[in-house]
């Protein structure tokens, strides 16, 4: 059965392996998630499992003495999403994501998915929104080289020549230019699970995982295996 779970990034630390070597790891709060919907080819055109993660309050609307509406928990779950969760028999969730699995029928609606679905040594792919770096130059954004730093030079951290003047008289698409850096979806493949804490639903993954602390991380079985 294919596996997938939602997690929150807690940070990085280091542990010692059995042979005494120091291993840098990322600590992830993986689950518990609940299955909120099972999509099939007959009903939806594709096979997938929809899961929810982290409880969220319901949006409550009351009326005061004057008859005006008063909203409590303004950022809570609306009626449409609450009906969706009630149909699955689960509490309201903050994050809802889908995993396209061919074996979606093997999951049960309302069942829990915890960190113990993964074992030590499993290979996973981790996806998250990377840290936003703001507006950056071509050197930091694309790793380009700088010019001479002498006083007479007027070319220090510029991105270099943008395009020829006569032919083709334009700047090609894809030219490395200054601009917004980061805050995009990044997937790191073939990460190794080095420790699983089933009681606390923690996964310790070797190496770095994209995203800042408290970021939502999507974890799946790796789609490819790289030989060590």
Image (cartoon, grey):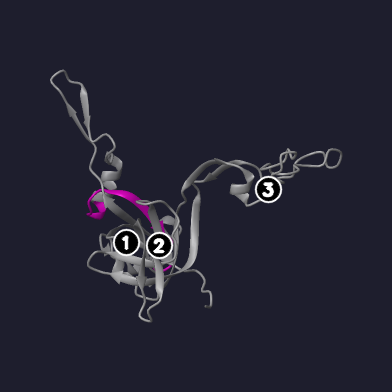
In the image, taking residue 62 as reference, residue 207 lies left or right, namely right
Residue 186 falls within the magenta-colored stretch: no
Q: Which numbered disc, 3 or 2, marks the residue closer to the eye? A: 3
Disc on res. 219: 2
Q: Horizontal and vertical percent for residue 141?
A: 59, 48
Earlier residue among tags 2 and 1? 1
Q: Identify the residue shown where x is 78% and y is 42%.
A: 163
Q: Badges 2 and 1: C-beta atoms under 8 Å apart?
A: yes
Who's the residue at 35% across and 67% down the image? 204
Q: Position of residue 100 (x, y in %)?
A: 43, 61
Asked if the magenta segment contains residue 99, the reply would be yes
Query: Which span of residues is magenta-colored?
Result: 87-103
Q: Which residue is mark 1?
A: 30
Q: Can you say whether 185 is above or below 3 in the image?
A: above
Q: Quadrant of residue 107?
A: bottom left
- Which residue in the rendered view is the most extreme toward the bottom? 19
């Amino acid at each position: 059965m294919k596996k997938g779970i939602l997690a929150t990034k807690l940070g990085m630390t280091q542990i010692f392996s059995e042979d005494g070597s120091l291993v840098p790891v990322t600590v992830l709060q993986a689950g518990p998630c609940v299955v909120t919907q099972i999509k099939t080819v007959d009903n939806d055109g594709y096979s997938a499992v929809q899961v929810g993660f982290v409880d969220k309050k319901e949006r409550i609307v009351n009326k005061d003495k004057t008859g005006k509406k008063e909203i409590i928990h303004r950022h809570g779950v609306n009626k449409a999403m609450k009906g969706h969760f009630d149909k699955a028999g689960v509490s309201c969730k903050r994050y809802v994501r889908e995993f396209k699995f061919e074996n979606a029928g093997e999951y049960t609606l309302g069942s829990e998915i915890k960190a113990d679905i993964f074992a030590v040594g499993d290979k996973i792919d981790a996806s998250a929104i990377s840290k936003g770096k703001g507006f950056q130059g071509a050197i930091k954004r694309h790793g380009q080289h700088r010019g001479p730093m002498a006083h007479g030079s007027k070319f220090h951290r510029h991105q270099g020549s943008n395009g020829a003047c006569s032919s083709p008289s334009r700047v090609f698409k894809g030219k490395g230019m200054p601009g917004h850096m980061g805050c995009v979806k990044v997937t790191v493949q073939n990460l190794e699970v080095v420790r699983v804490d089933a009681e606390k639903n923690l996964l310790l993954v070797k190496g770095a995982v994209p995203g800042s602390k408290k970021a939502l991380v999507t974890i799946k079985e790796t789609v490819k295996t790289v030989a060590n």
